[in-house]
Amino acid sequence: MLSTLDMQILEILCEDAKISTEELATMTGSDREAVTESMERLHREGILVGVQTLINWERTDREFVRAVIEVNVQPQREKGFDAIAQRIMQYDEVRSLYLMSGAYDLLVECEAGTLRELAQFVHSRLSVIEGVTGTSTHFRLKTYKYGGTIFETPNTDLRQAVMP
Amino acid sequence: MDLSKVLNQRVAAVPPSGIRKFFDIVQRIPDAISLGVGEPDFVTPWPIRDAAIQSIEEGRTQYTSNWGLPELRSNIARYLETRYGVRYDPASEILVTVGASEGIDLAMRALVMPGDEVLIPDPSYVSYAPCVIFAGGTPVPVHTHAENGFAITPEELRAAITSRTKALILPYPNNPTGGVMSRGELTELAACLQNTDIMVVSDEIYSELVYEGHEHTSFASIPGMHERTITLNGFSKAFAMTGWRVGYACAPREIMVPMFRIHQYTMLCASMQGQVAACQALRRAFATQYEDVRKMVASYDRRRRLMVEGLNAMGLDCFTPKGAFYVSPGIAATGMSSEAFCTELLEEMHVACVPGTAFGESGEGFIRCSYATSIEKLREALRRMEQFVRSRK
């Protein structure tokens, strides 16, 4: 069960991960020790798992290919989907992996440097995993919004600069 | 033709807003961080925008009733009763206005006769005094002080009342100070007014934005005050809807009649789309127990704490505001005037604040900082201000 302080810390970090322990303490109206203790616990419990910067690589010169792959698998006795998921998630090409309801079982988000590398990953590594019964690859063409952030329009403040 | 002779001298005598100058300077500084913005940094929640779009698609492009959409008025009545315990008849005591700003103007024009005095806490929002003057009255500042939380005390109120006092404006939670008044404090003011004919114009536009457990009291909910109170509120601050221009004025029927008449002949009605959006805002608030509002308040609250702590740490004495989204730190320690402080801070460090003097004489020695800006920008602004203050000591 998370405390109000835990929740407040998570909400603030969602907005700005660069915030310091002192600032967190100020903003939540608690002391530094309480914030440190809460953050350590959130880490231990696997709730705070990491910090990343959101980058719109499409605005850079970097070449890459991104795809989402729908994967059908034969679930294994006792282990269900987890064992196969465990194997798939090990590949560096796999950026995210979800178990899905509906027409397929696993959704794999992939990234590779070139089309050839991605093709190789699909046909010689992913498809051949025991239990994988089929894949369907879709290329991502453009990112409009990611992680709650709109990529297309730069973040502009439309307000008048000084208002009473 | 001498155009200066054709002008209404009463209007011509009102000085331009002191804020304009800062706006102009900010325009030519591309990396300026503005703490001078008097509106939320949230965009209107999507479901509210969507309702307005849908109404355009459906061809709802007409005038509404002069009073405003009936459903909106009954939602406002429900809101005021459930949230603040004030009852107004949606058919004859609630008028939808073009922002709370129109409500200020209507109230003044309906009440004020030449020679009448209107008491205005100082510092306060910039529009009250000009509206009093436009209506032919005389604004009388009631100076408030940081040590009293910028609230009006009964002594100050009694000292300001004369035989010509027509009305008292009660703008709490306050822009620019963030000061609030508790139910107890308002009850004491009510006692001073009890046997007078003084009306109260209670501008409660920031009523939803309160912190540290403060509970907003609507002045009309204080026993005996309903009959002498004009309550002004709106959607701009609580629902991040400034550009829609929708507010409302509530008053007993006899007072509403002249206010309605002015509105009917000058404004006709607030925009259809704004009213549809406002209606959706309240519907949604009722259905979600004010979820959007709660989230916005929680976010402002964190930034409020960050600003108060940061300003105090750099040696600017900072009254802890419990309302709105402003802090007004004292800058006396630097020995500078508010105007000089803000001008130099903007020119040298590219941080825009508004001098307290823009809000009245009592604002001298204070600057207004709005914290309705991203945490990232607030931290950078605090860093620059700290450097500035250090260079001036």
Image (cartoon, rainbow, N blue to C red):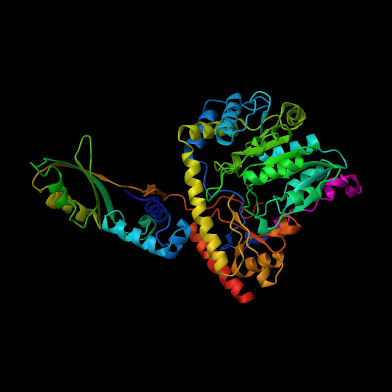
Q: How many marks?
A: 0
Closest to the observer: A120 or B335? B335
Instruction: Place residue A107 in its image quadrant.
Output: top left
Residue A70 in the image, given as x and y percentages of width and height: 21, 42
The residue located at (61%, 26%) in the rendering is B69
Give the image quarter of residue A106: top left
- A31 relative to B257, above or below: below
- Report the magenta residues as a range: B1-22
Q: How far across and down, in percent of the image, does residue A22 sit?
A: 44, 65
Up-down: is B290 above or below B16?
Answer: above
Residue A17 location, quadrant: bottom left
Please indicate whether residue B216 sits to the left or right of residue A67 in the image. right
Q: In the rendered image, is residue B194 in sight?
A: yes
Indicate the position of residue A157 as horizontal and vertical percent values.
Answer: 54, 52
Is residue B98 at all visible to an observer of this figure?
no
**Residue B13: within the magenta?**
yes
Of residues B63 and B118, the one nearer the viewer is B118
Q: Which one is in front, A41 or B162?
A: B162
Q: Which residue appears at 70% of the width and 31% of the height?
A: B251
- Point out the image quarter for the C terminus of chain B: bottom right
Q: Position of residue A44 (x, y in %)?
A: 26, 58
**Left-right relation of B363 to A89:** right
Q: Looking at the image, which residue is at 62% across and 38% down? A: B234
Task: Determine whether, in the image, residue B339 is placed left or right of residue B30.
Answer: right
Q: Is residue B388 magenta?
A: no
